[in-house]
Amino acid sequence: MATYKVRVATGTDLLSGTTDSISLTMVGTQGESHKQLLNHFGRDFATGAVDEYTIQCQQDLGELMIIRLYKERYSFFRKKSWYCNYVQICAPCGRIYHFPAYQWMDGYETLALREATAKKKADDTLPILLEHRQEEIRAKQDFYHWRVFVPGLPNYVHIPSYCPPVRRNPNRPEWNGYIPGFPILINFKATKFLNSNLRYSFIKTASFFTRLGPMALGFKLRGLVDCKQPWKRLKDIKKIFPANKTVVSEYVAEHWAEDTFFGYQYLNGVNPGLLRRCTRIPDKFPVTDDMVAPFLGEGTCLQAELQKGNIFLADYRILEGIPTVELNGRKQHHCAPLCLLHFGPDGNMMPIAIQLSQTPGPNCPIFLPNDSEWDWLLAKTWVRYAEFYCHEAISHLLETHLIAEAFFLAMLRQLPMCHPLYKLLIPHTRYTVQINSIGRAVLLNEGGLSARGMSLGLEGFAEVMVRGLSEITYDNLYIPNDFVKRGVQDLPGYYYRDDSLAVWDALERYVTEIITYYYPCDAAVEGDSELQSWVQEIFKECLLGRESSGFPTCLRTVPELIRYVTIVIYICSAKHAAVNTGQLEFTSWMPNFPSSMRNPPMETKGLTTLETFMDTLPDVKTTCVTLLVLWTLSREPDDKRPLGYFPDIHFVEEAPRRSMETFRQRLAQISHNIRQRNKCLPIPYYYLDPVLIENSISI
């Protein structure tokens, strides 16, 4: 007889345990065991438990390859889901085999698990292992399907049980079939149909909604969400979040109108990837030396500053020509401005000219810092309004959430759990589908934020994202290249750049160590058919087959694979942290980040007053709806895992385990450096502190 010691670990999240019967079969190179019920006197498979069992077999099974877990009805008890972390088996020879699961078993079903050693398809030679990986991929492809959300945007996870009525728009036939949703903050039915392995944990779900409910109720009781009137006084806006203040949010409220802070946000705000060095003033923005000379300092001129590389441009052309909607019975307005900035010898980035249209003309004046106080402030506020859309629609929702979901779904459908890339990437996909499902209900459905709180409405907001995807390139997602292409690689005080490059370097070195361990040569990359299928599916379903994106359709070398995987992980972690974590701090003072404008852009100078400025800002209801959603989506619920924290044991080989520990040490040093630097800054920049970066997009 051969004796096997079995340890079964149940998840620690509340409700992970089960009362169903669990049985086990082991498959080795020398045979297969009989089906053995795992049962002790008393409770088995309780939440957080690690249960131990002894199994006797007629013979040694040889090297263990696969186990099967059977979940079946127990007595009269009702069916109950079970979350299995892993199974460990000590063979008669003393060798310990690890079988990672980290997934739910909802019904009465059988789950087959591979031994944890990472294997590419070329590494499997036994027919049973090849058959297992093929069957796993086939089953996932049968279960997870691609679905068109909006034509022109990345496709997403199809939820078969979620079939709300289709909205028809006779004016935009290409939108027919677009999926509407349910009223904001009332119904999240779209998310309940998610497979258990894609949903939030119980703790995270409870945290998310228990924070949202009281805040929404407080807004309602104070009458904020029912007031359609404009704000009477600027200071009243501070009353929206009286108890949610930080050093940064207070600084924003005090300094939002200052030119220095306006320019600072291009470098270290929530949308720090837009600004470009300007070497030539574009024809559509006819700024002259006479206009801006007073703001450049003595002994210089516009041409000289252009040649020195001190002039920068923020161009919002991507917003041009999108129609607006009515909010609370009033027509909203929109513009696609241009903003010219100067980086002075004092180290400040200062706005020196603003044009509120892409087309110059007599009805489109160029606003300057020496215009009247309210003209200049309102011109800057229009720019900040444009920032809202470029940030929320493109930098945040499109370039992190939607793209990351497409990366994840392609991984699920094309890579088996035993694949080294699956093991490397899976921590960076946790809860992404769940938060995106909530995001669609909150942002991109009728009754959601885009319909109730934005000048562009549902279709206009989506149109911004469609335009954004049409311009995304692979090179721009490679962070070191992006800074060089925008001409900001040597700009002082650009803490976002400094921190992102530090995190990128740590990520790239970590990925390099893992990839080179499993792919010793270029031939191993080119010959990995599962890897190539993953890359091809991302190109097809995420980039929609657009060749001008520069996204690869295949990878041929080890360096190409390293760059590709580093981009994927960076987007799913650090990039999202940079554009998400500071949302509430920079937006809670609404004039700094308005989502709608109630009056058209100024066509004449000298007419703006405090009264017209206040009347142009979003009304009370629109402000509160927008800020409530942003508050919800920027406050990290419990059950978070910071970058580099990998509690689930997917890799068992010593080399990748060492690389993970080294990665954590590098991140700890980066965190220390950031905190030391921030001690000397009037506005600390901590959004890329690794301690605050999540492994995945989960909020």
Image (cartoon, helix red, strand yellow):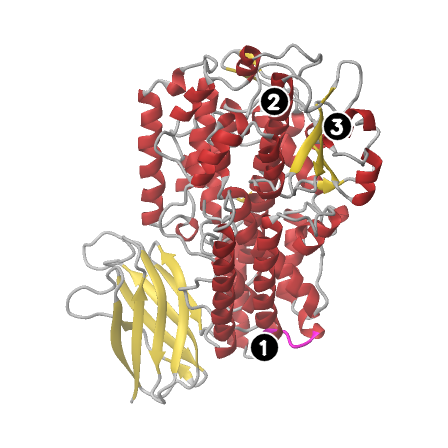
Residue indicated by mark 1: 123
What amino acid is labelled 3 in the image? Answer: Pro
Residue indicated by mark 3: 294
Q: Earlier in the sequence, mark 1 or mark 2?
A: 1
Q: Which residue is drawn at 44% across and 34% down?
A: 250
Q: Can residue 695 be seen in this view?
A: no
Q: Is 366 in the magenta?
A: no
Secondary element at image label 2: helix
Q: Quadrant of residue 649?
A: bottom left
Count of numbered badges drawn on the protein? 3
Q: Earlier in the sequence, mark 2 or mark 3?
A: 3
What amino acid is labelled 1 in the image? Answer: Asp
Q: Disc 1 vs disc 2: Cβ atoms closer than 8 Å? A: no
Question: Horizontal and vertical percent for residue 524?
Answer: 67, 73
Q: Quadrant of residue 274?
A: top right
Which segment did they paint magenta? 517-521
Magenta segment's dominant SS is loop
Front-most of 564 and 574?
A: 574
In front of the other: label 2 or label 3? 3
Q: Disc 2 vs disc 3: Cβ atoms closer than 8 Å? A: no
Q: Disc 3 vs disc 1: Cβ atoms closer than 8 Å? A: no
Residue 131 to residue 637: above or below: below
Residue indicated by mark 2: 377
Question: Horizontal and vertical percent for residue 676?
Answer: 49, 56
Alpha carbons under labels 3 and 1: distance apart: 69 Å
Q: In which quarter of the image is residue 413?
A: bottom right
